[in-house]
Amino acid sequence: MSGHSKWSTIKRKKGEKDGARAKVFTKISREILVCIKETGSADPANNSRLATLVQKAKANNIPNDNIDRLLKKAAGGSEKNDYENCVYEGYGPNGVAVIVECLTDNRNRTAGEIRHYFDKFGGNLGASGCVSFMFSLKGIVVLNNEDGNIDEDKAMEDILESGADDFSFEDGCVEITTDPSEVGKVAEALAALGYEVISAEAEQVPSTYTKLTDEEHIKKMGLLLETLDDNDDVQNVWHNWEMDE
């Protein structure tokens, strides 16, 4: 669950996923299956969207053998794939903007569940486009720098040569911005140079943030994100809650 790839949020997301590896693999597998079906290519070298998903799987510590088996199954057409993309937009407590990206085999079921979550935790589901104008799709690659050993001058050279657009050194990490279609390529190039990639995906980055000060709002917003994350149909949740670091 990430409103933006600030280190505190990424660390929280990574920790949660490490504790639920099977669920994470299920969700990423679903994305990969749909990608291969829609693009007709199971070769990451010739499919930038697929390459980004493979890099996302690696960043979540999914073993290469698992990824390879999934790609072969998808290429052979032996995996059932009746999923469709659904995007829901709405507001959490105190007007926090939320985008929920889903892959589902039952649109009515998923819509009902998502609406219930928003209602239960003090928010409301809105119409398509009600909050997406506050976000921009960007490729975000995050490198681990918890020990502070990354040399800034060398990293700058490597990052720009990898094809990235911009970067910034944050607390414990290096955050890199690139074109969404290039995020897999950039992450792979940096990983080959020895950098530890902890996140690599196209993200909906908010233009403004909403701060929550009421304890009840904070509690309900946290529960909304956790409940959405637990739903197997939910692939990504983007929000503009300015979380405490």
Image (spheres, grey):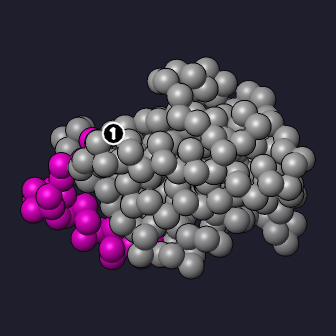
> Is 157 situated left or right of 48 in this image?
right
Q: Residue at x 56, y 70 (%)?
A: 17
In the image, the segment drawn in magenta is 62-84
Number of dots carrying numbers: 1
**Image quarter in which the C terminus is found:** bottom right
**Image quarter in which the N terminus is found:** bottom right
Asked which quadrant contains residue 146, the reply is bottom right
Disc 1 target residue: 85
Q: Of residues 11 and 221, which is closer to you in this image?
A: 221
Q: Of residues 34 and 141, which is closer to you in this image?
A: 34
Q: Measured from the top left, where is residue 184 in percent x and y?
A: 49, 48
Q: Measured from the top left, where is residue 167 in percent x and y?
A: 76, 41
Q: Of residues 96 and 22, which is closer to you in this image?
A: 96
Q: Which residue is drawn at 58% across and 51% down?
A: 120
Residue 66 lies within the magenta run:
yes
Q: Measured along the vertical axis of the image, is residue 182 above or below residue 229?
A: above
Q: Which residue is drawn at 45% across and 67% down?
A: 24
Residue 154 lies within the magenta run:
no
